[in-house]
Image: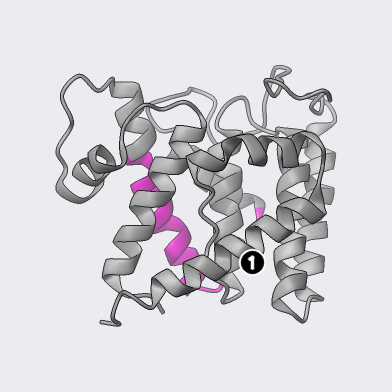
Amino acid sequence: MFSNDYIDDLLVRLAHHSSAIENNTITLQETVSILLYNTIPNKASLREVYEIDNHRFAFEYILDSIKNKETLTFEVLFKTHSILLERLHHERGKFKTNSNAIVGADFTTASVQETPILMKQWLDNINYRLENSSTKEEIVEAVCESHIQFEKIHPFQDGNGRTGRLIMSYLLMLNDIAPLVIEKEDKGDYILYLANEDVEGFTSYALKKISDEEVRMTSFPAN
């Protein structure tokens, strides 16, 4: 489906930019060193290294799930979250047990009590929409809207952003669409899309980035 070189390139960019959006300071070249050469940069904190390195194993997991054509389930979601939070948080792979918030957002995330039922509705909704979408644009819009709702619920104690962004790429690739890499330079716009629940704006942004990604893919020859 994808060349090995492209997969390495995608992993590095996903890990770097998604972590940087959460204020990880490891550079793109340092991310290459960690993920492709197993070399830890000088002065890097263990937490930041783990945030990057965990993407390697989470990405491998979702690629296997895509190869097996696994529809998104709680098992896939919890496993992805658990891998991303390995060595970082004791509450991995389960819903939050304390209230949380999104810095800068003017809305309240779901309560601990509300989260399980809201997430069941969220999961049923995204799978239904994907099953009934017939165009690339419909699929991308469904994925973008589901991501906004996922982040609004904020179902996990920590790691919601990293998990949500990786799940977006999982859903896109599962439907034979190029993944979405939200770059750290776009953090401000991305946060506004979430805060304003701007499905239209986020979808337009995603379609442009996915188009760019399709071009990038062609520069990596198939194996």
In the foreground, 83 or 184: 184
Q: How far across and down, in percent of the image, does residue 81 sit?
A: 53, 40
In this rendering, the answer to whether 115 lies above or below 198 is above
**Hey, which quadrant is residue 9 in on the image?**
bottom left
210 and 47: which one is in front? Answer: 210
Q: Nearer the viewer, residue 61 or 160?
A: 160
Name above or below for residue 134 compared with residue 170.
Answer: below
Q: Name the quadrant containing residue 127.
A: bottom right
Residue type highlighted by circle 1: Thr
Identified at 44% across, 34% down, the residue is 20
User: Residue tagged by mark 1?
Assistant: 71
| Residue appearing at x 62%, y 34% in the figure | 188
The magenta region covers 53-73
- The quadrant of the picture occupied by the C terminus is bottom left
Q: Position of residue 14 (x, y in %)?
A: 43, 49
Kind of element beneath mark 1: loop
- How crowded pointer 1 is (Cα within 10 Å; few <14, some 14-19, many 20+) is rated as some
> Residue 18, position in %: x, y?
48, 41
In this image, 70 relative to 32: left or right?
right
| Residue at 20% across, 19% down | 43
- Residue closer to the observer: 140 or 218: 218
Q: Is residue 72 visible?
A: no
For residue 191, say whether it is visible: yes
* Residue 64 among magenta residues: yes
Total labels drawn = 1
The relative height of residue 217 versus residue 79 in the rendered view (above or below) is: below
Quadrant in which the N terminus is drawn = bottom left
Q: Main secondary structure of the magenta part?
A: helix
